[in-house]
Image (spheres, rainbow, N blue to C red):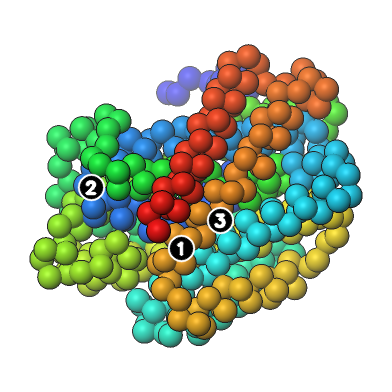
Amino acid sequence: MPKPATPSSEKRRSDKRATLLLLGPAFVAAIAYVDPGNVAANLTAGARYGYLLLWVLILANAVAVLVQYQSAKVGIVTGRSLPELLGERLKTGSRRVYWLQAELVAAATDIAEVIGGAIALNLLFGVPLLLGGVIVGIASMLILAIQSRRSQQSFELVIVALLGVIVVGFVSGLFVSDVSAGELFAGVLPRFEGTDSVLLATSMLGATVMPHVIYLHSALARDRHGVSNDPGRIRTLLKATRVDVGAALLVAGAINISMLLLAAANLRGADGNGVSGTDTIDGAHTAIVAALGPTIGVIFAIGLLASGLASTSVGTYAGSAIMGGLLKVRIPLLVRRVITLIPALAVLAVGFDPTQALVLSQVVLSFGIPFALIPLVKIASSKTDMGEFANPAWLRIAGWTSTIAIVAINVLLIVLVIVGE
């Protein structure tokens, strides 16, 4: 017969159930780590250099855990989002300039995500890119309507479901791929092979921590859990947040690594086998179909579509949080979705190369990273703002080290792109 539950075991089970009920915001934020820009970077890395840059994704994911936890922590402890805190500190002129750069970053993100979804529809159904962009925009409006008319938790469930589709789309190919265990373990060792591999590595790192999701996570955590002045309640929320962030970014990291491994096992040297353009998403899809068959190709394209839909919805949500916090102006999410869709459709309408547009959008994002990261770590480490929950010494050191490293990497990315052109 099973032993009766003791009070301590019942409490542990109750605590686990309570923690599970608090999960969600980080999974929404994690969508930014598996958007079409990441797809392009990871596939290119695997196709050109095999397993060489695997360590970059591992390092980037570790840094992302630190950054996203601090963002959520700021929202929970202060009861305000990062944009709101900045809006309170900046004078009117500075606040508007700050909003403008943050808005440009959000717009660049949205362009990449709509284009990624349009490419997926083109791969799946042959839909012209412009029409595909319109369809992605309409679909994202339907997803945002769930958040507007129902609740944030309902929105989180939809995003988590799309994340599940992304997992299947980008991981399934590994089960029929011949991944080299020896080369995989060798990829954990940091090293490069020439200037181009350095440029690609900086692109991968630079595209990982996106400014808009740093702003957003603080708002997501605050809106999901509410505002509390009870230290005990805050400790409980922070404990759940650590689990939330760890689990969400473990999933996102696994997806990114799977994309690189899929490309390393199947796309490296594909140009020499009659399949060209593997450094573009559609070229990589063609190579995947040639190597693994049409079924895996369809599953991959579905994952890309889910990535575009989820990330563009989250991007619009982030833009709304940025505008509300910095300008104290709130535009309905659906209206904002229509407005921010215009630049993406314009890029598709003029016939600009979609993969190149993805790459350029990541460069624009790199300009905005210091504006989000520096104030985040400063506020999260401030006893004035965070009280007893201010970052301990080890987290302050880790936070500032990560910030300096990411800013330096993105400056290097910009310099290399300019020099390369």
Q: Is residue 281 visible?
A: yes
What is the x, y in percent for residue 375? Answer: 71, 35
Q: Residue at x 30, y 40 (%)?
A: 54
Q: Is residue 167 visible?
A: no
Query: Are discs 1 and 3 less than 8 Å apart at CB?
Result: no
Mark 1 or 3, closer to the camera: 3
What is the x, y in percent for residue 371? Answer: 67, 42
Give the Cα separation between the discs numbered 1 and 2. Answer: 20 Å
In the figure, residue 225 lies in which quadrant? Answer: top right
What is the x, y in percent for residue 293? Answer: 18, 69
Query: Are discs 2 and 3 less than 8 Å apart at CB?
Result: no
Give the Cα separation between the discs numbered 2 and 3. Answer: 25 Å
The three-letter code of the residue at mark 2 reads: Tyr
* Vertical position of residue 125 compared to residue 140: above or below: below
First in residue order: circle 1 vs circle 2: 2
Q: Residue at x 82, y 49 (%)?
A: 95
Task: Give the label on residue 194, or none.
Answer: none
The residue labelled by disc 1 is 358
Quadrant assignment for the N terminus: top left
In the picture provided, is 94 more to the left or to the right than 237?
right
- Between 19 and 291, the one nearer to me in the picture: 291
What is the x, y in percent for residue 200? Answer: 35, 48
Give the Cα separation between the discs numbered 1 and 3. Answer: 10 Å
Task: Give the label on residue 364, or none.
Answer: 3
First in residue order: circle 2 vs circle 3: 2
In the picture provided, is 44 more to the left or to the right than 272?
right
- Between 20 and 9, the one nearer to me in the picture: 20
Badge 1 crowding class, 10 Å Cα cut-off, few under 14, some 14 to 19, many 20 or more, is many
In the picture provided, is 281 more to the left or to the right than 360?
left
Q: Residue at x 62, y 48 (%)?
A: 368
The three-letter code of the residue at mark 3 reads: Val
* Vertical position of residue 199 compared to residue 70: above or below: below
